[in-house]
Image (cartoon, rainbow, N blue to C red):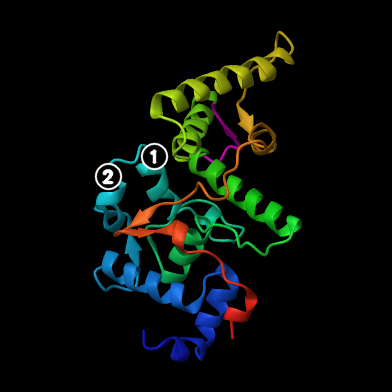
Amino acid sequence: MGTLQSLSDEPEYRELAEKTGFSFEQIGILHKRFKQLSHNENTLRRADLDTIPDLACNPIRTQIIEAFFDKRNFHQNGDGTVEEISFEEFLVVMSHFRPPALNMTEEQREKVRREKLRFLFNMHNTDNDGTITLEEYRHVVEELLSRSGALGKETAKGIADAAMLEVASISMGHMEPDEFYEGITFEHFLKILKDIEIETRMNIRFLNMDTTTLCNRDSSSIR
């Protein structure tokens, strides 16, 4: 990878920094992780992520791995999945787990929050039909609450169960007798999670690297 100065002189790394919000230093660290995971290849496959010890006990491990191969998460207008990803695609997906910068405007923070929630929604909307089930929603809430560290797993599970029942009663309570409940849409998902702070709770670990430490730097770091 060379020094940080040499990275800043390479147009592709400048573009990656601008596209993802990562600094050159962070891109260098992530590139090393990518090479370790891919066994020094230029592309990464599901099997490479499947062997990460830090993901072994994660209850949504499968969804996390699939998210890296979902075209909807590449900041493009594609859908479907791919068999392998490049470093750029890996970096773009990783940027969804990066905490927001402290100097963001309210408008920027709201955009980041929406992108994170869309990413989270896509993880559970695996068939890309535009909806997730009540059970999938319950699982999302439980994960977000348990990752805060302030609640035990059983407490988080109890709150998630109650949240699922509340959404069910609200959603189905406004339905006509002959209507069929099709699930939670993304816009509905945004509304029912409006009081849950998710910006710093979406993080994963790769080879002992915690994404909560990969905070955005201001634009002056891209020079």
**Which quadrant of the rendered structure holds the C terminus?**
bottom right
Magenta segment: 126-133
**Which quadrant of the rendered structure holds the N terminus?**
bottom left
Identify which amino acid the numbered label 1 is placed on. Ile
In this rendering, does residue 43 appear at all?
Answer: yes
Residue tagged 1 = 60
Residue 29 percent coordinates (x, y) = 38, 72
Residue tagged 2 = 56
Identify which amino acid the numbered label 2 is placed on. Ala
7 or 177, which lies in front? 7
Asked whether the beta carbons under mark 1 and mark 2 sit within 8 Å of each other, the answer is no
Please say whether residue 129 is one of the residues in the magenta stretch: yes
200 or 128, which lies in front? 200
With 204 as the anchor, is 18 left or right in this view?
right
Q: Majority secondary structure of the magenta segment?
A: loop
With 189 as the anchor, is 6 left or right in this view?
left
Residue 25 percent coordinates (x, y) = 45, 77
Q: What whole-number distance in Å separates the C-alpha atoms at marks 1 and 2? A: 10 Å
**Is 211 located above or below residue 182 in the figure?**
below
Q: Residue at x 71, y 8 (%)?
A: 177
Dot 2: within a 10 Å radius of its alpha carbon, few (fewer than 14), some, or many (20 or more) residues?
few
Q: Residue at x 60, y 26 (%)?
A: 183
Q: Residue furthest top?
A: 177
Residue 219, quarter of the rendered image: bottom right
Q: Residue at x 54, y 27 (%)?
A: 133
Residue 189, quarter of the rendered image: top right
